[in-house]
Image: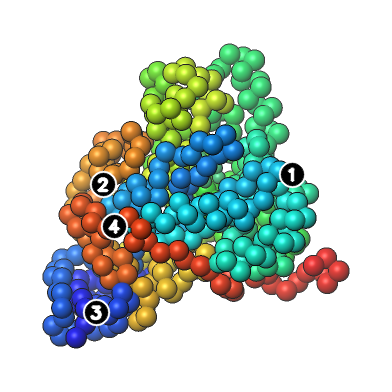
Amino acid sequence: MLDVVIRGATLVTAEGMQRADLGIQGGRVAAVAASLPEARRVIEADGLWLMPGGVDSHCHIEEPSPDGTVMEESFESASRSALAGGTTSVVCFVPQWKGGGVLERFADQRRRAERAMVDVAFHQIITDPTPEVLEREIPELVRQGVRSLKVFLTYDPLVLDDAGYLQVLAAARRNGCLVTVHCENFHAINHRIAALKAAGIVAPHAHALARPAIVEREATHRAIALAEMMDQPIQVFHVSCAEAAEEIARAQARGVRVWGETCPQYLALTASDMAREGFEGAKFMCSPAPRDEAEHGRVWAMIRRGVLDVVSSDHCGFSFDGPHGKRANGADAPFDQVPNGIPGIAARLPLLFSEGVAAGRIAPEEFVRLVSANPAKVMGLWPRKGSLHIGADADCVLWDPKAERVLSNAAMQHAIDYTPYEGRAVTGWPVMVLRRGEVVMEGDVVTAQPGSGEYLPRGPYALAQGRGVLEPWLS
Ligand code: DUC
Ligand code: ZN
Ligand code: ZN
C-alpha cells in the first residue's frame, strides 16, 4: 500500500499539465496515474494544482560576518518562511573572508543548517582565491558536495578583480563547478557614490542613482566575456534590466554556456519605492537596484524569450529596526551605510504566480520551470528536485490558483520585521506543502520539525561543464 495518495489535483510540471493522482512511497514519488488505489493517507485535492516544491537557488541565510555578527534570519526561521510560500529546497551561501579559507566556513554553515526544515545545498563564495583555496580547498569542497562558486564583481571587501575572477573560473573548470556572478562595476559605483555624497544626495533613493543599469550591463558583459574565454559555464545572478539581459542573450546566441537569473523584486519593486517618506525607502534597497515600471515589462519579455530562466528570491533578511538591520547605522544613515538586501523567500512563488500566470504573461508550466525545475537543473539537483518524476523526492505544493490574498509581514512567517510587499494583492496561494512525502505546511501552519531538512550534496553534472573548446595550454 502506498504511504500517501494525492487525489484529484491537476499536476503541473515543467513538461505539462494533466489530471492525475500522485502516489508517494518512502518519501518519493512512486506512481502517477489517472486513478490510484487507497493509501495510508489520502489527500483530496479537487480544484487544486499539484506542483513540484519550489527550489530557491539564491538565498542568504544565517551568514556570519568576520566581526562575529550573523544575519538575523536563521535556518529555522528561513525554512518556516520558505515552506509557508511553497519552497522546499534552497541553495544558500558559505562566506569566505579575506585571509581565511573556505573549509572551516563550510563546516560552520553545515552545522548551522542542521536546524533547517527545508533541504539545503550550498554555493561557496570566493573572495580570496589563494593557491591554498584554489588547489586544495576547492577540490575538497567538491568532494563534500559543493558544485557552485559565487563571485562578486563589486562590494568591498567581497569584490574580485579580473585576475581573481579568472582564477576562480579556471578552478571551477578544473573541478566541474558552476560559477555564479554578482555583476556590477565596483569602481563605477564607488565613483558615483562619492559624487552623490559630495552633492549631499544621501537618502535611500540615492542607492538607485549610484547603481544604474549601465554598471550592471558592463559587469555582465565582462563576466560573460571572461567566462567564454575560459570555456566555463556561469549563471548571472539577479538580472534587473533588459540591457544586462541583452548581453546574456547575445552570448547564448553564440552558444556560450551562460544562464540568467532574475528575482521578483525586479518585476514588482521600483526605484521610486526607495524614495518613500523618511527612511522607509531603505526597506526596498537591494542590489542591483530595482528600476522603473517600464523595465518590469522588459524583464518579463526576457523571461518569455528564455534568456532569464530562473526566478530566485535573493532572500537577504535585514530587519528594519534590529541591531544589525537597515537602521543599524542610524535612522538617517547615508545610503551607502545601509545594508543591501530584502526578504522574499515566502513571497517568491505567490508574486511570480500572480504577476505571471494569473496576469496571463506565462503558462503554468513556465511558472514551474522558473521557480522549481530550472533552478534544480542549473544547480545539478534535477530530477531529484524540481520534478514529479517517478523516484524524485516527493516535494509537492498543492496550490490554489484562484485564492486571493494580501501579502503581509505576518504571512511571510520570517524573522524579519517587515516585507517590502506589504499590502500587495496576489492571486494564487499554497495551501499544503509536502517535503519528501511528509506534510510540512497546511493552511498556513508550518508543522515541520527543526532539523528535518537534509543536506543536498551535489555531484558532477553536464550544465556545469564547458564545451571543450579551451586551448589545452590554458587549462
Ligand atoms: N544583493 C546582493 O548582492 N546580495 C545580498 C542582497 C542584495 O541585495
Ligand atoms: Zn548578489
Ligand atoms: Zn545575493
> Crowdedness of circle 3 by 10 Å Cα count: few (<14), some, many (20+)?
many
Give percent across and percent down for residue 178.
61, 62
Q: Earlier in the sequence, mark 2 or mark 1?
A: 1
Query: Mark 2 is on which residue type?
Result: Val
Q: Is residue 84 left or right of residue 113?
A: left
> Crowdedness of circle 1 by 10 Å Cα count: few (<14), some, many (20+)?
few
Asked which quadrant contains residue 179, the reply is bottom right
Quickly name the residue at label 1: 161
Query: Mark 1 is on which residue type?
Result: Asp
Report, in whole angstroms, how far the alpha carbon at label 2 lies from the one at label 1.
42 Å
Q: Which mark is residue 449?
A: 4
Give percent across and percent down for residue 444.
21, 51
At a point 66% along the width and 37% down the height, the residue shown is 157
Looking at the rendered image, the disc whose residue lies closer to the viewer, 3 or 2, is 3
Residue 16 visible in this rendered orientation of the protein: no
Cβ atoms under marks 2 and 1 closer than 8 Å: no
